[in-house]
Image: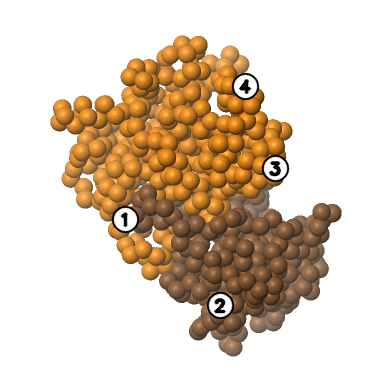
Chain colours: A orange, B brown
């Protein structure tokens, strides 16, 4: 046990511990705080160097807020975001603002919407070169050379660098966004739904590009997505979130083949399979996702869980490692046998 | 008795174009297909393939500067008579009785399709009053019934709420309730679950299937999600750049696709059942700009089996390639 622990810690790039982000709800003339939206409520996970971890969950579960807290685009309410930087471990959540800029070299973001995330009045050269300018890298010529290199890297023709984003298709724009994220040679790339705004035939191109870049540059990805088939395709490990908490984290194949949390089981079963011969019995969850401003007591999932017992209504489950690298927060994790997605014949 | 086996709706050689200063966009360019009673027809394609404009053409709600240029859309009505919707004036009494009466419509975005300043009930009751000769009280009773039938809890209370007070899933249910309030024989669902989460999507698809079984209504399901089509459809039409490139029953389309576009599309989607982190086969390039339509077969610049001198000059026709299936590709002609 100690050996695996030590081995793991050695390669950990990002270690998130007890992360919380509460947004106050203000009402009335004096804007008194009457409650909190617990967008992220005690999230703990780690990310190894060179791997891809996906955060999945339905809208409103806190996956985007988590990723933004990690980059400190918003300040977390509590918790630690430990990033190893050349042997030194820094807490992104609390480092003074003066150190933030140099820290952000290490972590960059790819956004969901390739239309609104690129300034329409800037050329490709300006867009991709901007991170270099902000961080004071090189002179104009050196920056232009680097932009050429980056555009080639993401499969765009450098001749286009004087053009504006409107001249490019959705897939090409997403490539521009990726080039910009890679400009400073970051270690950690946070990709927030990078393919969900793209057409299916273009999605595959971008996913392949992300895999290829990871191999070539040794990048570490935190991949935020709601599409489970995309997640399965890109990640080594998957963390499933539900109403501000991570309910299950496991290596990809294991999570899909034998989920241990009832919510993961329901989520997997809800995904429509692109094969008419597999019209199977689906688990249809009743009711709605809990309101993060007014979470149910005990396990957040218990009102919709068909396996719920008295203890689930009273006590919050604690995250436990039930198999190597397989973490679950469920009181009944070890006794339930849940249905995963069978590996079937390829299409 | 005879029209029972016949198509409820037959679209023949439909062409809808948008005339703009920059040029003419042929959004739908010769689409033909049939919808049969009690069956679900899935229309799949990527953005810009003309699937939504096809639906708008059927209901005659194509926005200016768009216009149906050619074609027939024949609807068999409840009394057995046949009406060509293309010949009707877009604001005539007859098409207005068909819209929402014979044909119901569900949009993708339940948030923007409801008026935010009227209650859900007001919009539901309006639909009932328009299409049936009943009083206000009876209309309200039917409205509550409609909300109940789509699984909205406490419909007596919900009917007086505004659309923004409902969650995404409930809003889409309310939208379905409006579409179903006049017992349509055909329901056109344009990306009904795209804005929803997977678990909510599963609920809505289950609901649609239940209602179809109960009422024997036909569904025309427009989507880009191949998974949703595989789960729901009986027959599938695959569109690319305004044309039908392939059609057939759902099992044939997914297990024995004929057209290179269908094949490539099926291979390029990451599946929840595939092996992780293996490179996906891709379709090269991207969908051409509508002003920049390739000559010949619209798919030939991206097609792996494109034949020079044929695919880039001639137009392939949609022809039978087996029992009950058609494809428009020179590989089979």
Question: What residue sits right under mark 4 in the picture?
Answer: A139
Chain letter for the residue marked with disc 4 in the picture: A
Crowd class of label 2 (few under 14; some 14 to 19; many from 20; radius 10 Å): some
Q: Assign the N terminus of chain B to one quadrant of the image.
A: bottom right
The disc at residue B331 is 2
Q: CA distance from mark 4 to mark 2?
A: 55 Å
Locate residue B258 relative to residue B136 in the image: left or right. Answer: left
Q: Are marks 4 and 2 in contact (CB under 8 Å)?
A: no
Is label 3 on the same chain as label 4?
A: yes
Identify the element where label 3 is drawn.
Answer: helix
Is label 2 on the same chain as label 3?
A: no
Question: What residue sits right under mark 1 in the picture?
Answer: A341
Residue drawn where x is 36% and y is 20% of the image: A86
Crowd class of label 4 (few under 14; some 14 to 19; many from 20; radius 10 Å): few
Chain letter for the residue marked with disc 1 in the picture: A
Identify the element where label 2 is drawn.
Answer: helix
The image shows residue A46, relative to residue B195, as above or below, that is above
Identify the element where label 1 is drawn.
Answer: loop
Is label 1 on the same chain as label 4?
A: yes
Q: CA distance from mark 1 to mark 4?
A: 53 Å
The disc at residue A77 is none
Q: CA distance from mark 1 to mark 2?
A: 36 Å
Foreground: disc 2 or disc 3: 2
Q: Are marks 2 and 3 in contact (CB under 8 Å)?
A: no
Counting the numbered discs, the total is 4
Between A96 and A309, the residue placed more toward the observer is A96
Question: What residue sits right under mark 3 in the picture?
Answer: A166
Residue drawn where x is 31% and y is 35% of the image: A299
Q: Are marks 3 and 1 in contact (CB under 8 Å)?
A: no
Between B263 and A39, the residue placed more toward the observer is B263
Identify the element where label 4 is drawn.
Answer: loop
Foreground: disc 1 or disc 4: 4
């Amino acid at each position: 046990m100690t050996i695996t622990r030590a081995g793991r810690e050695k390669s950990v790039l990002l270690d998130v511990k007890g992360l919380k982000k509460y947004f106050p709800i203000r009402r009335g003339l004096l804007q008194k705080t009457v409650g909190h939206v617990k967008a992220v409520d005690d999230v703990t996970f780690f990310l190894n160097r060179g791997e891809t971890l996906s955060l999945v969950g339905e809208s409103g579960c806190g996956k985007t807020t988590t990723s933004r807290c990690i980059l400190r685009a918003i300040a977390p309410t509590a918790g630690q975001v430990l990033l190893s930087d050349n042997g030194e471990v820094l807490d992104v959540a609390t480092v003074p603002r003066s150190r933030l800029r140099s820290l952000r070299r290490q972590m960059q973001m790819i956004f969901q919407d390739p239309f609104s995330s690129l300034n329409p009045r800037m050329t490709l050269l300006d867009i991709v070169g901007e991170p270099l300018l902000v961080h004071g890298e090189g002179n104009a010529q050196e920056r232009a050379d680097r932009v050429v290199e980056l555009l080639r890297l993401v499969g765009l023709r450098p001749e286009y660098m004087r053009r504006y984003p409107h001249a490019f298709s959705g897939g090409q724009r997403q490539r521009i966004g990726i080039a910009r994220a890679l400009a400073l040679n970051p270690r950690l790339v946070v990709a927030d739904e990078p393919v969900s705004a793209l057409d299916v035939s273009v999605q595959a191109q971008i996913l392949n590009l992300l895999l290829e870049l990871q191999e070539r540059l040794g990048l570490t990805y935190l991949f935020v997505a709601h599409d489970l088939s995309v997640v399965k395709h890109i990640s080594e490990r998957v963390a499933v979130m539900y109403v501000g908490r991570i309910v299950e984290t496991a290596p990809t194949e294991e999570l899909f083949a034998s989920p241990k949390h009832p919510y993961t089981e329901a989520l997997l079963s809800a995904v429509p399979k692109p094969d008419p011969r597999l019209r199977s019995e689906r688990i249809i969850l009743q009711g709605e996702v809990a309101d993060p401003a007014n979470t149910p007591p005990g396990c957040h999932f218990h009102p919709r869980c068909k396996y719920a017992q008295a203890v689930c209504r009273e006590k919050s489950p604690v995250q436990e490692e039930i198999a190597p690298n397989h973490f679950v927060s469920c009181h009944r994790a070890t006794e339930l046998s849940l249905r995963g997605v069978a590996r079937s014949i390829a299409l | 008795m005879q029209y029972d086996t016949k198509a409820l709706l037959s679209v023949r050689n439909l062409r809808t174009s948008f005339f703009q200063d920059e040029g003419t966009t042929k959004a739908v360019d010769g689409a033909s297909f049939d919808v049969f009673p009690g069956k679900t027809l899935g229309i799949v394609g990527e953005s810009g393939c003309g699937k939504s404009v096809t639906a708008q053409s059927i209901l005659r709600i194509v926005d200016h500067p768009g216009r149906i240029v050619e074609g027939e859309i024949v609807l068999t009505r409840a009394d057995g008579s046949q009406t060509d919707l293309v010949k009707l004036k877009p604001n005539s009494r007859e098409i207005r009785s068909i819209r929402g009466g014979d044909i119901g419509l569900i949009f993708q975005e339940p948030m923007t399709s409801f008026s935010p300043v009227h209650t859900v009930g007001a919009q539901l009751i309006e639909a009932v009053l328009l299409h049936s000769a009943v009083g206000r009280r009876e209309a309200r009773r039917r409205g509550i019934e409609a909300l109940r039938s789509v699984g909205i809890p406490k419909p007596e209370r919900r009917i007086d709420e505004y659309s923004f007070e409902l969650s995404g899933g409930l809003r889409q249910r309310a939208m379905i309730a409006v579409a179903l309030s006049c017992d349509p024989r055909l329901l056109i669902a344009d990306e009904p679950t795209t804005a929803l989460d997977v678990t909510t999507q599963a609920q809505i698809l289950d609901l649609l299937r239940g209602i179809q079984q109960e009422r024997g209504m036909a569904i025309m399901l427009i989507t880009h999600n191949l998974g949703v089509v595989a789960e729901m459809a009986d027959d599938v039409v695959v569109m690319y750049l305004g044309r039908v490139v392939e059609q057939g029953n759902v099992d044939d389309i997914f297990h024995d696709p004929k057209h290179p576009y269908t094949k490539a599309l099926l291979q390029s989607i990451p599946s929840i059942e595939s092996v992780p982190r293996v490179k996906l086969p891709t379709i090269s390039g991207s969908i051409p700009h509508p002003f920049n339509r390739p000559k010949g077969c619209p798919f030939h610049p991206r097609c792996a089996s494109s034949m020079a001198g044929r695919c880039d000059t001639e137009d392939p026709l949609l022809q039978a390639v087996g029992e009950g299936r058609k494809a428009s590709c020179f590989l089979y002609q």
